[in-house]
Image (tube, helix red, strand yellow):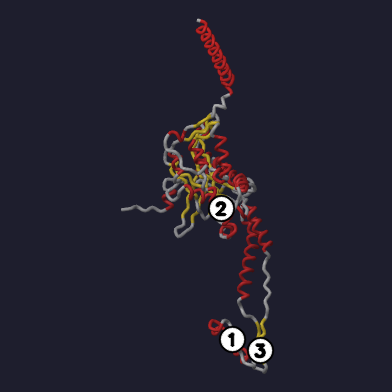
Amino acid sequence: MIEFRSAFDRIFGGARRISDDGLQQARLINTSISTFAPYNAAIYDDLTARTCIDVIARHAAKARPRHVRKKNQRITPADTQLDALLENRPNYYMSTYDFLYKVISQLFSCNNALVYVQKDNQGNVQALYPLDYQSLQLKEDGANNLYCQFSFGGMAAKRITVPYEDLIHIRRHYNQNDLWGSGTHEILQPTLSLLDTCRQGIENAIKTSTKLIGYLGFTQNLRPEDLLEKVKKFAKMFRSTSAETGGIAGIDNTAAFHQLQMDSKTAENDQTGSLRTDVYRYFGVNAKILDGSYSEDEWQAFYEGVLEPLFIQLSQEFTAKLFTVREQVFGNAIVFDSNRLQYSSLKNKVEMAEKLIPVGVLTINQALEILNLPQIDDEVGEKRFMTLNNVSTDIQDEYQGGKRRVIELTKKTKKGGDKNEDEKGNN
């Protein structure tokens, strides 16, 4: 029989449960508010904002998180369980792509993202879970250790307190608050509200243009109740015959219909475009990045302006929370790799391969990967080749001197051969 476990028990079942006894509200430096509510539906539920968040998360989620060891300025892969977890499935519910997409989406939606690091009794990382929570409170004990008390919504509301050191905390616009990235609502909501007003104006203009608006003028005096009855009769007749007669209705000579022209005002394309551009700037994207029509230079600008700083931030925070100080001293780190070359033109890829292969920088398989071609399975694919026109500076003099000695020896051999031939001729 299959055993089903709730998501809460799966994530926090083995957590270091902290009792609230002895904990008090954390006292920050610049604010006394220690409660944080992350979700802001007004931001993520807006079409323009979600489009920007989605394009950043989609591209960032293609990064490859790796456990490496750095020693003597060299980086070598660390073939560990943690490396396999990062590259394949960080937790029971998510692939690596889904995991990174969720973390980045949360970050750009509310400028904060929290990932719970699930560990076993020996301190080995078992899983990484991005947290969706209703609110949290910062707590501290007598030794000034920081804790987060999470409140989760849903039908069965639950609460749990975990050490802050067990949380990977990614922040954006980290300025005003001691611990949290500044919220998105105050700065972005006015622009999104104006965009929504423009959309509603266009919608109302379309609806108004399909309606017949006007008044009936009668040639005889009528009592108010009779007047109202005739108007209702005309409206009922128009609605019932419009489907059959293409929207044409008739009235007798006791009344005349006078149509009112409604001039609905909507925002110009330049005005709505300017509002969208403000939102694009806030997230660091542009229209070409959003619709995928970017050039190589435009992609490079997007990578350096948005993705690269994000990968640096992720690398530093993951390293700090997944390894002890001693492990970091021995070079353990988490890096996020992204193949920027896949967005280069074929011409640039070929030129790069032509320049880097002869100097031994690339293996055959690395060159094939740049060109989006299948790699070679045998050991030839991992070999490096170098032209003899290049030589290490350490043996440059020896190499050139050896070459001169070979030339001199060849000349001597040639002269000796000529002399022997002369002597044979004289004999």
Relative depth, front residue between 138 and 344: 344
For marks 2 and 1, the one nearer the N-term is: 2
Mark 3 to mark 2: distance in Å? 57 Å
Mark 2 to mark 1: distance in Å? 51 Å
**What's the residue type where badge 3 is placed?**
Ala
Task: Classify mark 3: helix, strand or loop.
Answer: strand
Task: Classify mark 1: helix, strand or loop.
Answer: loop
Relative depth, front residue between 113 and 416: 416
Q: Quadrant of residue 125?
A: top left
For marks 3 and 2, the one nearer the N-term is: 2
Q: Which residue position is annotated with label 1?
A: 249
Q: Residue at x 44, y 46 (%)?
A: 89
On the question of residue 175 being in view, the answer is: yes
For marks 1 and 3, the one nearer the N-term is: 1
Badge 3: few (under 14), some or many (20 or more) residues near its Cα, within 10 Å? some
Task: Classify mark 2: helix, strand or loop.
Answer: helix
> Against 126, is 38 above or below?
below
**What's the residue type where badge 2 is placed?**
Val
Q: Residue at x 44, y 38 (%)?
A: 376
Question: Is disc 2 in contact with disc 1, using a CB cutoff of under 8 Å?
Answer: no
Q: Residue at x 65, y 86 (%)?
A: 257
Q: Which residue position is annotated with label 2?
A: 55
Mark 1 to mark 3: distance in Å? 12 Å
Q: Which residue position is annotated with label 3?
A: 256
Q: Position of residue 152 (x, y in %)?
A: 49, 55
Question: Is disc 3 in contact with disc 2, using a CB cutoff of under 8 Å?
Answer: no
Q: Position of residue 42 (x, y in %)?
A: 58, 60
Relative depth, front residue between 392 and 31: 392
Q: Quadrant of residue 247?
A: bottom right
Q: Position of residue 94 (x, y in %)?
A: 45, 50
**What's the residue type where badge 1 is placed?**
Ala
